[in-house]
Amino acid sequence: MCGLCGALAGADHWTDAAVTDGGRRSQRRQLRNRVANEVLAYYGLSLKEAPGGSSLLQNRTGQTALVPHLGALWPAAERLAKRPLDPLDPSLIAALTRHAAKAAPTCRARLA
């Protein structure tokens, strides 16, 4: 999808319906992108904010896809990764667990 079509699509996805306040909506989207990036990094992908409320998905070789909402993220990620993304893959779960264990002391320090 070209950038113009992505900007004009404008239809909200049900995952954005929980928050209608603009500022909180942006915060929720940023948090969702951070969490998605933890999973996507395992597959060599990254997600960042793009103008117009969409996100830009990118692989290690620089291929990109404009993602208008969370529902479009995973199919686009599978296309760019050139393989299925399995959220129950034991290797992915182990990698996320290791990442969480490393991040936990940092999170505790911020709370103290």
Image (cartoon, rainbow, N blue to C red):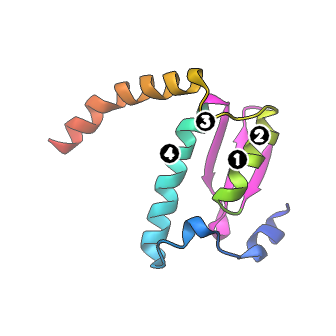
Q: CA distance from mark 3 to mark 1?
A: 10 Å
Task: Please tell me the numbered disc located at residue 40.
Answer: none
Q: Residue at x 48, y 29 (%)?
A: 96
Q: Amino acid at mark 1?
A: Trp
Q: First in sequence, mark 4 or 3: give its number.
A: 4
Whole-number angstrom distance, CA of label 3 to CA of label 2: 12 Å
The residue carrying mark 4 is 35
Tell me whether circle 1 and circle 2 mark residues in contact (CB < 8 Å): yes
Circles 4 and 3: CB atoms closer than 8 Å: no
Q: For the point 23% across and 42% down, which residue is it?
A: 110
Q: Decide if residue 62 is in sight here.
A: no
Magenta-span inclusion, residue 98: no
Residue 19 versus residue 88: which sits nearer the camera? 88
Q: Which residues are magenta?
A: 42-67
Q: Secondary structure at mark 1?
A: helix
Cα distance in 3D space between marks 4 and 2: 17 Å
Residue type beneath disc 2: Glu
Q: Is residue 40 left or right of residue 9?
A: left
- Residue 78, label in figure: 2
Q: Earlier in the sequence, mark 1 or mark 4?
A: 4
Taking the spot 44% from the left edge, 63% from the top edge, the residue there is 27
Instruction: Tell me the tag on residue 74.
Output: 1
Quarter containing the C terminus? top left
Three-letter amino acid code of the residue under disc 3: Pro
Up/down of 101 relative to 37, above or below: above
Between 48 and 98, the residue placed more toward the observer is 98
The x and y percentages for residue 6 are: 77, 67
